[in-house]
Amino acid sequence: MARAVTSPLLWLVGLALLGLIAAPCDVSWAEDDAAESEEAAEDEEEGETSPLTVPDKAEAKKLNDALKKAGKKKNATLVLPAMEAIEELDHPEFTKTLLKLLKHDSSLVASKAAEMWEWRVHDKKTASKLWKTAWLDKKNKRRFIIKAKSLKAFARAGHVLDSKQFKEVERDWRWIVGNPIKTNAAALSAIAE
């Protein structure tokens, strides 16, 4: 015959093990997390403003022509200075040229062009063109860092991926995880952001 447990101490230990009695603990960390979450929500509501300035049309045309001319060269050292000239500028004139540079033979140039898109996606039409160039173009099939940087641009613009685009991102993510190559580490962490 089983003997009944009558000791109150044994009851308390048994209930604590079952999780029915909460032990006193320090929960100040939870309050800190809640305060940080509220601050982050306030920051999101304020919205970030673009650090880019808008040049006048004549200056934008001149810089874009120089960028087009430099973009035809294969050597990255000749193209990158022209890209740096417009790095802190934003004008619709640059859109077509920057899209073209995403498909450049030099992955350095293409990567820099993808990085420059972070603050330049202003509407769905531009987002669509960026998606087609960065994700669907043959030259960028295994250039995962370019794809990751374009995702950052989409996120900054508030562009939501449709299911087909999401599946494409997921497929590439799985490929990178399944084929660990040191050069893809940056893309893997960038996609995860």
Image (cartoon, helix red, strand yellow):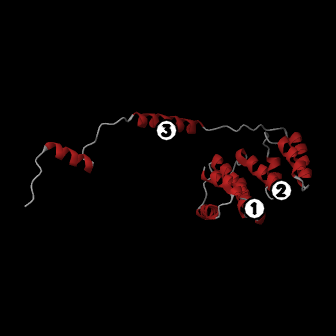
Sequence-first tag of 3 and 2:
3
Pinpoint residue 28: horizontal percent, then vertical percent: 40, 33
In the image, residue 29 lies at what x, y percent?
A: 43, 35
Q: Which residue is mark 3?
A: 37
Classify 115 as above or below 167. Answer: above
Instruction: Give the camera-side residue of 80 and 49.
Output: 80
Which numbered dot is residue 106?
2
Q: Is residue 34 left or right of residue 40?
A: left
Q: Secondary structure at mark 1?
A: helix
State the residue at coordinates (90%, 56%).
74
Question: What's the amino acid at mark 3?
Answer: Ser
Q: CA distance from mark 3 to mark 1?
A: 37 Å
Closer to us: 145 or 180: 180
- Badge 3 local density, few (<14 within 10 Å), some, or many (20+)? few
Q: How far is the residue under mark 2 from the one under mark 1?
A: 11 Å
Inspect the image, locate mark 1, and give the three-letter code of the amino acid beneath it.
Answer: Asn
Element class at badge 3: helix
Residue neighbourhood size for the residue with mark 2, other residues' Cα within 10 Å, grouped as few (<14), some (14–19), many (≥20)? some
In the image, which disc is placed on residue 38? none
Circle 2 SS class: loop
Label 3 to label 2, Cα distance in Å?
41 Å
Residue on which the image places disc 1:
140
Residue type marked 2: Ser
Local crowd at mark 1 within 10 Å, few (<14), some, or many (≥20)? many
| Contact check, label 3 and label 2, Cβ < 8 Å | no
